[in-house]
Image: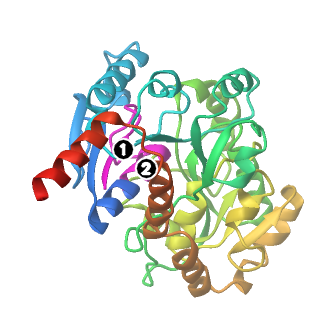
Amino acid sequence: MRIAQIAPLHEAVPPKLYGGTERVVSYLTEELVAIGHQVTLFASGDSVTSARLHAVWPRSLRLDPAMRDVIAPHMLMMEEVRQRAEDFDVLHFHLDYWPFSIFTRQRVPFVTTLHGRLDLPELQPVFHAFRDVPVVSISNAQRRALPQAGFVATVPHGIPEGALTPQPQVTPTYLAFLGRIAPEKAPDRAIRIARACGIPLRIAAKVDKADQHYFDAVIRPMLDCPGVEMIGEISDREKPAFLSGAIGLLMPIDWPEPFGLVMIEAMSCGTPVIAFDRGSVPEVIEDGLTGFIVEDEAAAIAAVGCLDRLDRATVRARFEQRFTARRMAEDYLATYNRLAADDRSIARRRRRLQLVGSAR
């Protein structure tokens, strides 16, 4: 199958450090290539892939200090995809609603995975206007805010089996927080939980410009607490040791989490997760098996004391059974095939007829 993967340009694919969407696009692209499909990745020029790379912009926008209008490169990318659309059997976008208007006016099947939160009021009229556009959710919980959207599948994220693995030589001694410093991720809760338990907390997270005030006003003063260490963003190479060294990953979120890639990153290292019952959490964490689902800080503090009851080998095994990149790729292939069965492209049908004629 000829597949186009269209990624955001904010980060490279895969990202050098933080970047959930671009990381998932990389995992999916590499797995589709490994299965044997012809994949073209539309992404920034500093991306690394075994697929054919169509570099729309020289480097990821976050690393370009001169970049002021991030929409312009994305508009260019959509036009380049449109010009090449007939080269593919399916177009897979990871750009939220941006492609809806243009690509409903052409014939090649396309689908969009929605990676972000969908409970914003301004999204309601957009998805009402484009209710027939095929979209994929990354959890069933993510769908609740937009029941009118044209969901064709729910495909949970996956990670390659060998990407992040348990490090048996590392002894778990601390609690971990991984991801992004933001009010909805609630690292302040993680600090209070760890402090109440008397266990060190290591925070591996980025601070976006939009969240700088929250970090300065709320988090920075809390970093003076004994046992709290802010280590900043870490790469995939650093994650196995970081997560394997954690007694548990704290995810005290305060928002409707669409998926939460950090949960399965922890599980892939055999590390159990304590997460607040928001959004996708009950679809990812099996309470009492791969972690604990809690309602508040008091319950989280109690759950920390129960982490030693969980078997880390079982946590890893459940990751392998539920959240591998191969499973994710197979789920998407089933979706592509359903969309391709409704192929309305006259030009592509002509090509097929020409191939049949030449074979005779």
Q: Which residue is mark 2?
A: 340
Q: Dot 2: few (<14), some (14–19), or many (≥20) neighbours within 10 Å?
A: some
| Element under disc 2 | helix
- The three-letter code of the residue at mark 2 reads Ala
- The three-letter code of the residue at mark 1 reads Gln
- Counting from the top left corner in percent of width and height, residue 58 is at 22, 28
Find the distance from the CA under tag 2 to the CA under tag 1: 15 Å
Give the mark nearer the N terminus: 2 vs 1: 1
Q: Is residue 23 magenta?
A: yes
Q: Residue at 40% of width from left, 56% of height from top? A: 28
Q: Which residue is mark 1?
A: 5
First to last magenta residue range: 1-26
Q: Dot 1: few (<14), some (14–19), or many (≥20) neighbours within 10 Å?
A: many
Q: Is residue 66 above or below residue 202?
A: above
| Element under disc 1 | strand
Q: Is residue 269 above or below residue 76?
A: below
Q: Is residue 203 magenta?
A: no
- Counting from the top left corner in percent of width and height, residue 199 is at 69, 66
Q: Residue at 87% of width from left, 57% of height from top? A: 295
- Residue 275 horizontal side relative to residue 58, left or right: right
Q: Quadrant of residue 36?
A: bottom left
In front of the other: 142 or 307: 142
- Residue 144 horizontal side relative to residue 99, left or right: right
- Counting from the top left corner in percent of width and height, residue 161 is at 42, 73
> Would you say residue 245 is visible in this rendering?
no
In front of the other: 32 or 347: 347
